Image (cartoon, grey):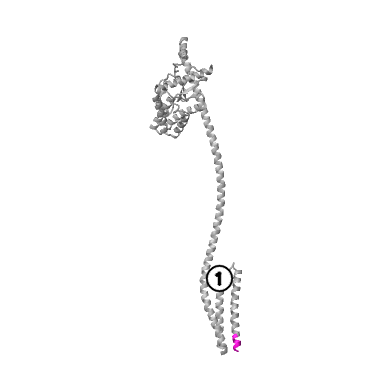
Amino acid sequence: MENMEKTWDTGTFTVASTGNKNRIYNALIKSDAVKDKDNLFEVSERMVEREKDNSKKALEELWLLKKTSRDKELRTIDMLIEYYQRKVDSVRQKEERLKNIGGESIKLIEEKKKLQQELLSISQELDSCVQEISFLKAKQEKLKAKEEEIREKNEDILAKLSGNENEVMESLSDIILTREETEEQGSHLSRSTSAMEQAQAISSIATPETPIAEPDNALPSEPDTAVKSDGNLEAIYKTYKPVERSRFPKSIVKTDRGRILGEYYYDPKVYKNSRIYLFNGRYFIDQVKKGLDLFRADTLNEAILNDVLLMANDIQNRIKTRNNILLEISTNEILNPTSLDELVENLRTKNLDAIEELCKRFNKKVEVMGANYEAMLAEQLNNIAAKHTDNVS
């Protein structure tokens, strides 16, 4: 009888333990199959709750059974009661812990879902930004290409405009120069009252040692009316130095408004179309200096520097485009094509100190040379005449 009780007790506990493990395993498998509806923590809570309820029911039934059992059966019933009581106590402890873990886990799951949604939204925004950046890059390349195309067209237009301006200035200067020389020749003939006077004039021109200055008929005798102008430029022109009389013949280049752009020495013995003209650097520098002084006194009057710039542009273009225009040898290290280019740039950028320095250097050079300045000018004109004579012969 005792052997039978021991065998029954052992079998009871073994079957109970294995059954519990199988129920847990089956429940977890089932929870994994329905994970879209529930999660592991919710399933575990329900399992613990069921185990606790089952253990309580088993205890209630065992206590009822104990009241009606025989003494021989009481020992086994007590052992079962003790087992289920321990199980209930253990389940209660696990239940509290699992509830805490489950609650925390559920919050983490919700937070995870929110983060995943936020991550998805950010990914979509990133994709949109990448597409927008690609669009902007393509648009940028198109705009750059368009900008370069417009710049090239603008440069071509500026170059054509500059060429047209130079051609217009050249044409005006040639027209004015031709008209003035014609007037000078007509004035000579009108003042000749006899064949003797004409012969004397021709004889005096033929003497190379004492060249005669042709009268500057293009200039009025009064400096206040030397140039016709309009607006605020009239006061500026009055202050400029009038053309000086010289023992060397000169041609005067003017604008259509009468503004003197420059003086050019020449040999009257040479036919007009074959003449070599020598630029009067002293007159030019004198006008630049006076214009600079005027602008320093009235820096708001841009017309002053523009007037001087017109003179500089004229001689600059003539030196570059015409072979019959020369600069003075005596001051060539100061006033030359390079320094003329620099002067034009300084006038455009209003670099007054650099302009002042050029004028000082030139005037100092002329002052140091003294009478040699005129002598070198005469020698240069004689050399030009001699070369022309050799070429003709």
Q: Secondary structure at mark 1?
A: helix
Residue located beneath label 1 in the image: 42
Name the residue rendered at 53%, 17% in the picture.
392
Give the image location of residue 208, x and y in percent. 46, 16
Give the image location of residue 152, x and y in percent. 55, 37
Q: Residues within 10 Å of mark 1 (few under 14, many from 20)?
A: some
Q: Quadrant of residue 31?
A: bottom right
The vertical placement of 100 against 166, above or below, is below
Q: Is residue 83 visible?
A: yes
Give the image location of residue 298, x and y in percent. 39, 32
Give the image location of residue 130, x and y in percent. 56, 52
The vertical placement of 102 against 56, above or below, is above
Q: Which amino acid type corresponds to the residue marked 1 in the rendered image?
A: Glu
The residues colored magenta run: 1-6
Name the residue rendered at 49%, 27% in the picture.
319
The vertical placement of 82 against 155, above or below, is below
